[in-house]
Amino acid sequence: MQKHKAETSAEGKKTKHKDEAGKQSQRLPAVRGLTSQGSAHETATELNEQNMLFPKLMNCNHPLDFIVAKLTTREHREEMAHINTIRELSIMDLSNVERLPIISPKISHARAVLQEYQKLIAVQVEVQSDVTGS
């Protein structure tokens, strides 16, 4: 089947070119197989998480307003208005975080604020489970 695709895409060219295309397509299935199995996707996700500001809060849809006062000065809060949720900030690429009006050192300060917020959420969940008896 793969050889057929190579022949179809090489239509109108000399037989020699068809054979070369067929040889190339025979080498590609191993690479394609990795992608279809999810291995390449998982690797890409891991790399992306390494470049995210704070992946542990990547599912947190709480408003950024909860922590914006700790991230930046009053004068620069409006410049952060395009970021609506904690999730949006957490998944942001580190190079983009460096461009934000966050108190310096930007990456470590933002991570500290997000980590503090994560701990606050964990305490709230613990208190709620104690109250409800879950």
Image (spheres, rainbow, N blue to C red):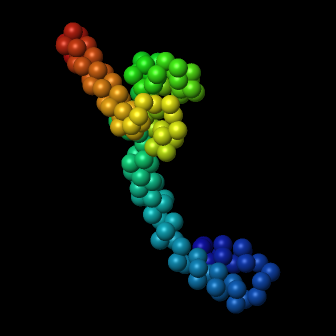
Residue 59 showing in the rendered view: no
Tally the numbered discs: 0
Where residue 47 appears, as percent x and y from the top left, is: 41, 52
Depth order, front residue of 26/72: 72
Query: Residue shown at 49%/45% (left/top)?
Result: 95
- Compared with 20, 85 (above or below) is above
Query: Residue shown at 42%/26% (left/top)?
Result: 71
Depth order, front residue of 4/75: 75
Residue sitting farthest toward the top: 131
Depth order, front residue of 80/28: 80
As drawn, is 24 to the left or to the right of 87?
A: right
Where residue 37 appears, as percent x and y from the top left, is: 44, 58
As drawn, is 50 to the left or to the right of 95?
A: left
Where residue 94 appears, as percent x and y from the top left, is: 45, 43
Residue 116 showing in the rendered view: yes
- Compared with 11, 56 (above or below) is above
Depth order, front residue of 97/43: 97
As drawn, is 47 to the left or to the right of 18?
A: left
Q: Which quadrant of the figure contains the C terminus?
A: top left
